[in-house]
Image: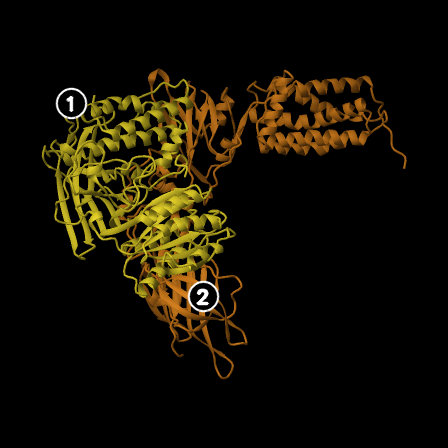
Amino acid sequence: MNSSKITWLAIAAALAGCASDAASSGTGREGPMGSRAVTQGGAQDIGHFRAIVGRGEVPEPSTIEPVGFFAEHAVDLPPADCGDRVCLHANLAVAPGIDQESNWTMAFLAMNTPVDPRALARPDVHLVLAIEDTARTALSASDVQAAMRALLNELMVDDRVSVVRIAETVEVLAEGLGPADPALAGVVDRFSRGATRAALYDGLARAAIAVDDVTAAGFEGAHRVVLVTSGTADAGITDAMRIVGLSDALASRSIGVSVVGLGEGYRPELAMQISEGGGSSYYYAEGGRDLEAIFRLEGRTSLYPLATDFELVVEPAPGYRVGRVYGARRAWSEQAAAYLASPVLMVGNRTGSADVGEGRRGGGGGLFVELIVVPELAAGIGAGAPAFHATARFTDAETGERIVRRLEVANGLAPGANPSGMFPHFSDPLRGKAFMMLNMYLSLRTTVELYHAGDCAQSLGIVPAMVATYEGWQAEYDDPDITADWQLLTALSDNVGRQCTGVTPVAPVAPMSCFYD
Amino acid sequence: MTERQPTPTDWTALRHPLFWGALALLVVNDHLLKGSGLLPGWLTGKLSDFAGLIVAPIALGALLGRLLGARTRHARAFAFALVGGWFAGANLFAPVAAATSALGAWLGLSWRFWVDPTDLVALAAMPVAWRLGQPGRAPAGALTERLALGLALAACVASPPPEPFWNTAAFLYNATDEDLELHVRWVEADLDCEAMRASFADALPREVFGAGTTFAVRAQSTLPLDRGVALGVGRDRPAPTVTHSGNCDAILVRGGGVPETLIFWSELGVRVIPADVEDDADRAAVAGGLHLVGGRDGAPIALVSAAGYLHAVPVDVYDGGASCRDYGEVRGFDWSELPRWVEQPLRIDAIRPTIDGCLLLELVERRSGWGEDGAAHEVFLCVPPEDFPFHQNAEVRITSDEADLRIVRDLEREDGTSWRTGELRVVRARGLFFEGPFRAQLTTVDPTCRGERLACGGFRLPGAVGLAMDGTTRYVHPGELVERVAADGRRARLRVGRAESMSVTRAACGAARDQLGARMDILVSYGEEPR
């Protein structure tokens, strides 16, 4: 497998929608043993963005996927000792804006779990392979055969496999067969690459019915769907909302949908949304060999649901309103609150060989919510007053109990006040890395946005504006994740410089913070 | 057949007063009027085109006939085709214009051409020129004709470059004394122009604008903002495809000291504006446009817009949607497409609910007259299961297209007439909808709602279905159900799945929301009961 070409958006990840062991974060600092960060489904790194920068180009802004970026980082959280299977943690950072005068107040919410998937018994698994067979995916029978063989080799004798072929209509080629069943070998002959359209909804819905059928036949293990798609739904029911809704409905029954994007004209938008239901992983494969590796990993993967029907609401305290939100594509904001919802939170485990692929796999991530001070409402509010409240609601996947947890986080400074000096104020001073991580994400994103918006001077101004912040942070913490981010940022800025010869950098106007002077 | 030889009678047109008039106009226009400020640039350009298309083909035809000894008619036809073809090509295709300019440069002449399809109107002069060039009886080579030919060739070849101008509805005039680099991003979404006038800043986040292009806009020059004009000039990149409802467009512009600004325009007529503003006539021509002013002595550059233009700072955090409510659960109705050839009766072999509230119908074709089962089909139908009025093994007929699905069950009576025992109609309606006892229309229910931004880049206004009932209007919100008795005595149920209006949409919004305007998903079912 050519790992320099493949975009490993999730392979060898912390098993999407899953958890990573914070103790193995690679930060050089000991994390709370037995706690694992609970991250979102979907992309688990920014390999595609990194590859474009590596080629000396300036990627489009849409290629820097925030969920994937944050998932590359290890973020320390307090121990998961809240007594629930999912623990919510919050932090607040107050720092000057990048202009060193304005105020930047940012909330961070993240979750972890005490559940160790390695200690859980592996359930039998029913994998439904829903594979698009069109000229767009251009999968040959030998591609499918090799991928299926790789998958079947990883399964246990009591596991089950179903295969759904997606073309203009859908066809169930196999249902509930054991991995050694010779009938599975015959399904590859049905792949022809002759279709021009794909009924994506119909294929996914048929996969869901296969789950019901196999359950009805007496199977008692876990189910998972692996969808191979060109990203286009142009036959059958084509409404993207309904397709994503179906994926969410599967996730709410703890059935993850891993998505493998494939094909030259691949369109990632819909495929990524499908994978973000909280269930499984998102991959992009450039061909049959990549598909084979992905199927092998999927065969090794087990997922365990922690919570369903998860909701997080972040409400600003008096004196503040909600601004931008980062870190979760499914989050949305209004002035009164920011929201995040997910049908399921899972923790994952994988058997077999050691980690593969490139990039970092920290498993970090969370929701960042900008708090904007409203001067007329903040008058008279002093230091130590609440800055925001966070409420998490979810159903324990094991007990079925509906759980509500609420946190209140105070600002040690008056609303809008900056800390003395340029070191930020954190409500949890031991765990400020998440905000530095956000700063690095915003630096990368703003650099490409300004470049593609035609503003070379401001784009080139990001690195000079951030260098003191970076050096100050690293002098204190020497974090390898942040070092890697900085190397990526400087490489990107060099690429911009080569495209914008003779341009003098100017100080950017961007919604970022300045941690150090 | 005897071939006609070239005769000394082919230079007649060179003596014609109209030819001389066109030649005089060409010389005077090119060398006196252009740049004098007496006439606007666009007019002098057009005069040159008309005069040139009389002078050039006649002169070239005469020259070819003389030099090549070709037959007169063939030489003339070739000359007209060459001149007309080149002129059309250079005004339609940037590469032809660029090649012409390059040829001029190679010859040491300052030819400059711009693609401008409106110049094709000057081709109307060619039939006149053709008629002038009909063979006459004047001897070739007479002094007058030689003089005319020489002057004509000199006038055509040594023509000064035309004053460049744009044919565009929207434009930006850099009225400052600074050369500016402006980055312009055109909206990549379909807009409802009428709705956008009141809500363009609310409705258009940065994400719906394309990557854009950087333009060098010199001081006292103009930039056309019609995407086809701006992106087509000297560039081979296609304009983004958008289909606005009405005459409008929107851009995001920044750079050169101009802060990022969202600009929307509507109902502007196409006009001719000079590319360079050099005199009072040019300034008059750009009046009423979008002007960049200031910049002197460190003053900030500001945007001044005229009627038809609106501009605003992009709204990062839009909260106007907070007051927008769907007074019910929006769940549109969908169905898989059926094979086109399915027209015969179908037996519902199985009805299976899916986990997202849809139905899988397993259908079997019934062979007419045979009473046997044929091919099987699986169809997904996304309507509330309780609204599906048929049972397993019912024999039905289905007609469908992208916007309308109808399933009926007819039983044959002993007298040969049919009895419609059950019926389901599902529609995606855009305007008024009539079915049985129902008269439905999309209605706005919340006047404080400015619209709701969607993650796909769309902008929607929630609504309800207004049913005209007994002289009043009853509002039926998404998810709600109304029952009435039809004129034929059947009990009819209407349920609303979706009632909204899209004023911004794009492909990412999916099949349910990729069309501008009103959209109602409505089903009407008639239960299986005797009449």
Residue A80, percent from left and from top: 15, 44
Chain letter for orange, please.
Answer: B
Residue nearest the observer in this picture, A356 or B42 = A356
Where does the N terminus of chain A fall, quadrant-wise? top left
Residue nearest the observer in this picture, B113 or A36 = A36
Instruction: Give SS at disc 2.
Output: strand
**Mark 2, chain letter?**
B
**Marks 2/1: CA distance?**
71 Å
Residue B436, percent from left and from top: 42, 68
Residue under label 2, please give it. B406
Residue B496 visible in the picture: yes
The residue under label 1 is which amino acid type? Answer: Gly
Q: Tell me: B293 left or right of A74.
A: right
- Please determine whether, in this image, residue A285 is positioned above or below residue A173: above
Q: Residue B306 is drawn in which quadrant?
A: top left
Q: Tell me: A345 left or right of B253.
A: left
